[in-house]
Image (tube, rainbow, N blue to C red):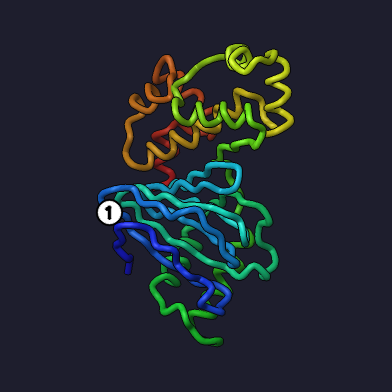
Amino acid sequence: MAFIVPELPLFDSEQFPQEAVALRLVGQKNDAETPLHQHHKCQLVMALSGFVKCKIDDAIWIVPPDCAVWIPSQVPHSNQISKHADVCMLFIHPEIEGMPSKSCTLSVTPLLRELIIHLAAQKQDYADGSAAERLVRVLIDQLQSMPTEHYDFPIPSEPRLKAIAQALIAAPDDRRTVAQWANEYAMSERTLARLVQNEIGLTFGRWRGQLHIVLALQKLSVGGSVQRIAEELGYESVSAFITFFKKTLGQSPKKYMKLKD
């Protein structure tokens, strides 16, 4: 059973000594968000429908359907779920081996998805040797083998890059060139390009492209049209946006979302 909440409460996973506990939330008419917080248990945020946007440390992460964001122990984060989204939160003891050491996005198989949904419907204070505890063993085994995806937009701590990142988030249709951004922050094009590469490990174009993928998936997951998304992200044509999306994720937007249904 899902819990209908007007706001996202801070679920106290620490009150349960069990290796894994789960919570299911359904959003209402408006987006809802937890304030910045951290906890001892690691957290997996999985969207069943709609999307979740996580602010984790130095990046914004998107959780489209059939994916989940992994948040390690004691990492500050906040979670925003879209209106009417259906979301599962899984909390895992940090001493369990084989889990990712850094924040990342994981693909979620149908089996893992159903295991988490089933666990969320159980009493979370389950006993050792119970059916729920045996299910958790399988769940953890499955989670340890999940492949990673790339649905994050890194926000560097370097002041100029952080300002550029915030400007791009505020106006994702801003198509200024590297030279134009460099001029605004009183540096050469080469200096800005090198700074982005050193701080983020990407070219400027790929960095901005990561933001466009994050936003496109967010908008697609709530039924946004490809044409409208292309316009909002500043592409000259729908075909240009489709080409970018297909080059990045290997499928056109419609085919990609169909595979996620």
Give x and y (percent) for residue 217: 44, 38
Seen in the picture, residue 183 relative to 117 is either above or below; the reply is above
Q: Residue furthest left?
A: 29
Question: Image check: 59 left or right of 102?
Answer: left
Mark 1 Cα-neighbour bin, 10 Å: few <14, some 14–19, many ≥20:
some
168 up-or-down from 126: above or below: above
Position of 257 relative to 78 (above/below): above
Q: In this rendering, does residue 111 appear at all?
A: no
Which structural element holds mark 1?
loop
Q: Is residue 202 left or right of residue 227?
A: right
Q: Residue at x 70, y 13 (%)?
A: 188
Q: Quadrant of the N terminus?
A: bottom left
- Depth check: 15 or 22 in front? 15
* Residue kind at label 1, given as amino acid type: Gln
Residue shown at 53% from the left, 66% from the top: 91
Classify 68 as above or below 158. below
- Residue closer to the observer: 60 or 96: 60
User: Residue at 45% of width from left, 31% of height from top?
Assistant: 252
Q: Which residue is mark 1?
A: 28
User: For the image shown, how many numbered marks are present on the structure?
Assistant: 1
The quarter holding residue 27 reads bottom left
Can residue 183 be seen in the rendering of this structure?
yes
Residue 60 picture location, percent across and down: 53, 42
Which residue corresponds to the image point at 48% horizontal and 70% vertical from the top-left?
12
Q: Nearer the viewer, residue 75 or 118?
A: 75
Q: Locate residue 34: give its quadrant.
A: bottom left
Residue 203 percent location from the top left of the image:
66, 25
